[in-house]
Amino acid sequence: MKPDRVKPEDITQKDLGFFRLLREFREELADASVGHTPHPSFEDSRRLLDMGDYLSLMLFGLLNPVANTLRGLSAASKLPKVRREICTNPVSLGSFSEAQHLVDPAVLEKVFESLSLKLRKNSPCTMKGKSKAVREWMSHDGSVFPALPRMAWALYGAGRDGRANGVKLHLSLHIGADAPAKASVCEARVCERAELRKILVKGSAYVADRYFGIDYALFSDLRAKGCSYCIRVRDTAIVETLGAIPLAEGDAEAGIIEQHLVILGGKGHRSEPLRLVKVMGVTGEIILIATNLSAKAISAADLALLYKHRWGIEYFFRWVKCVMGCGHWMAESRNGATNQIYLALIASLLLQLQLGRRPSQRVWELMRWHSTGMADATEVAKALGEMAETERRKEEKRKERDRFFRGL
């Protein structure tokens, strides 16, 4: 079994090869394809490009710094090493473009979920909190990837000129393991709350921002699925107080002002009875957090900590966009764009499993330089060490800042 956390000094030339990641992907893809019926076109003897070769070339395009277009990857498929490691035959541009319509995203979804489960099992919990329940929560949000004007299916009519378009990734990120757990891809106009209802995992626990807190019916839907929630609500919410809930030891030091049993909303739009916690943010902002858990199940201090860790999903979105090359599309159909985003998620998981952490953007760039021979394994290992030290210093500064504000 891979160690939970790879030390920078243990990184070798062999560990950093992108071809190794591609081989691991092919193994996972083979397992996910068991019982799956591919598109009949892949069974045609005249088709030389099979599903595994196509997806591996697409993943190679996300990982390497040189070939990241259909034409570039088609030309790369003629190179001897690429043909040995990735695809058996040279790939024509027409066949490569057509394949995006033939691959079922459900196969990549299975690969993604398998790697996610493996990462969550192998990774130590990075979440600190008094309550054991804090370690099992997922942060949920959505992020838009800019689409090209000709991707008409992604048009959602927003923006200054009313013609902006985009593809949205809806994601649940396991807070404790810092690992994506559930994802879906659709056009940006789809409501994030509606998409969350579709991908809810029964019995799970979710942390979300104010956008989700304006739909009071969502609270009841989460409870009906056996889910716990920690969702911020707007400061302007109408609050009917049913009773005060005493603070526990340590809550005041964590910035908790008060907590009550309440009902949110007015006539015709009311929530179920829930617990509302009022928190003083580090900048002096008042934050209202709603939950269906009692004070015995999870303290107000741990709820505040949970919401603070919600921001991890924003960093994850930023990282995936680095892998995607800021929305550079190698496939422009709905099916092809979905597959490409799933491949970006899979690349992130493979890198995190390989290195024990998600590399920063600078380390990611250095790894890609390494793939071209411009940097060696020692330089990448040094960069990983510097990244770990930077993270440690940032964590110390955060703790010092929190102590300062709590002492005011």
Image: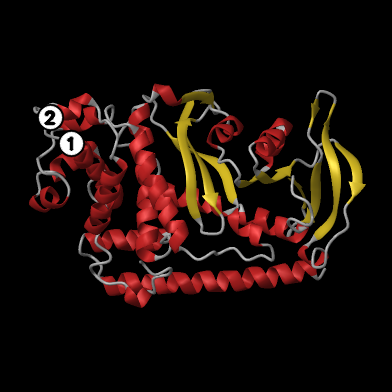
Query: What number is the disc on residue 47?
Result: 2
Write down the residue under mark 1.
Answer: 50
Q: How is the image coloured?
A: secondary structure
* Mark 2 Cα shell of 10 Å, populated few (<14), some (14-19), many (≥20): few
Residue positioned most to the bottom: 9
Instruction: Mark 2 and mark 1 in contact? Answer it, CB < 8 Å.
Output: yes
What percent of the width, then of the height, locates residue 255?
A: 79, 61
* Mark 1 Cα shell of 10 Å, populated few (<14), some (14-19), many (≥20): some
Instruction: State whether residue 366 appears in this view.
Output: yes
Q: Work out which quarter of the rendered image holds the C terminus and state it.
A: bottom right
> Considering depth in this image, is 315 or 349 the residue closer to the camera?
349
- Element class at badge 1: loop
Q: Give the residue type that dot 2 points to.
A: Arg
Task: Tell me the quarter of the picture where residue 125 sits.
Answer: bottom right
What percent of the width, then of the height, locates residue 130?
A: 69, 66
What percent of the width, then of the height, locates residue 82?
A: 14, 50
